[in-house]
């Protein structure tokens, strides 16, 4: 029991935390309870790729994403 209590106060290194998050395919924020939004690794990769694009390319992608979300919500509302 004492071991369990001691382990509650130990911290893991950021490298270990990253490996755990990668293995579970979640973000570090989700892993440590900072968000209730679970983001899978494919989504994270896409977000990183978008982050590397020019401002105008990002704006174009956001317009497309917004249109797709709007259309999806409209279809659900009328289904």
Image (tube, rainbow, N blue to C red):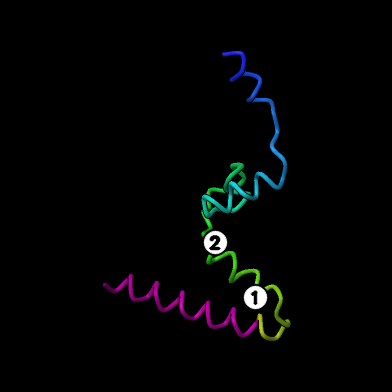
Compare residues 75 and 45 and report the one nearer the observer. Answer: 45
- Residue 76 position within the rendered picture, expressed as x and y whole percent measured from the top left: 33, 71
User: Marks 1 and 2: CB-CB under 8 Å?
Assistant: no
Mark 1 element type: helix
Mark 2 element type: helix
Compare residues 67 and 36 and report the one nearer the observer. Answer: 36
Compare residues 77 and 18 and report the one nearer the observer. Answer: 18
Above/below status of 39 relative to 64: above
- In the shown orientation, is residue 58 left or right of residue 38? right
Residue beneath disc 1: 50
**Helix, strand or loop: magenta stretch:** helix
Above/below status of 60 relative to 9: below
For the N terminus, the image quarter is top right
Magenta residue check for 69: yes
Compute the Cα span from label 1 to label 2: 14 Å
Corner quadrant of residue 53: bottom right
Corner quadrant of residue 17: top right
Magenta residue check for 78: yes
Magenta-colored span: 59-79
Residue beneath disc 2: 41
Compare residues 27 and 2 and report the one nearer the observer. Answer: 2
**Which circle's residue, 1 or 2, is located before the other in the chain?**
2
- In the shown orientation, is residue 73 left or right of residue 10? left
């Amino acid at each position: 029991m004492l071991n369990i209590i001691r382990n509650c106060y130990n911290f893991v290194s950021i490298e270990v935390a990253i490996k755990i998050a990668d293995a579970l395919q979640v973000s570090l924020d989700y892993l440590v309870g900072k968000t209730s939004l679970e983001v899978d690794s494919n989504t994270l990769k896409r977000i990183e790729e978008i982050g590397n694009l020019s401002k105008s390319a990002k704006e174009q992608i956001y317009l497309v994403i917004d249109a797709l979300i709007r259309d999806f919500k409209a279809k659900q509302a009328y289904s």
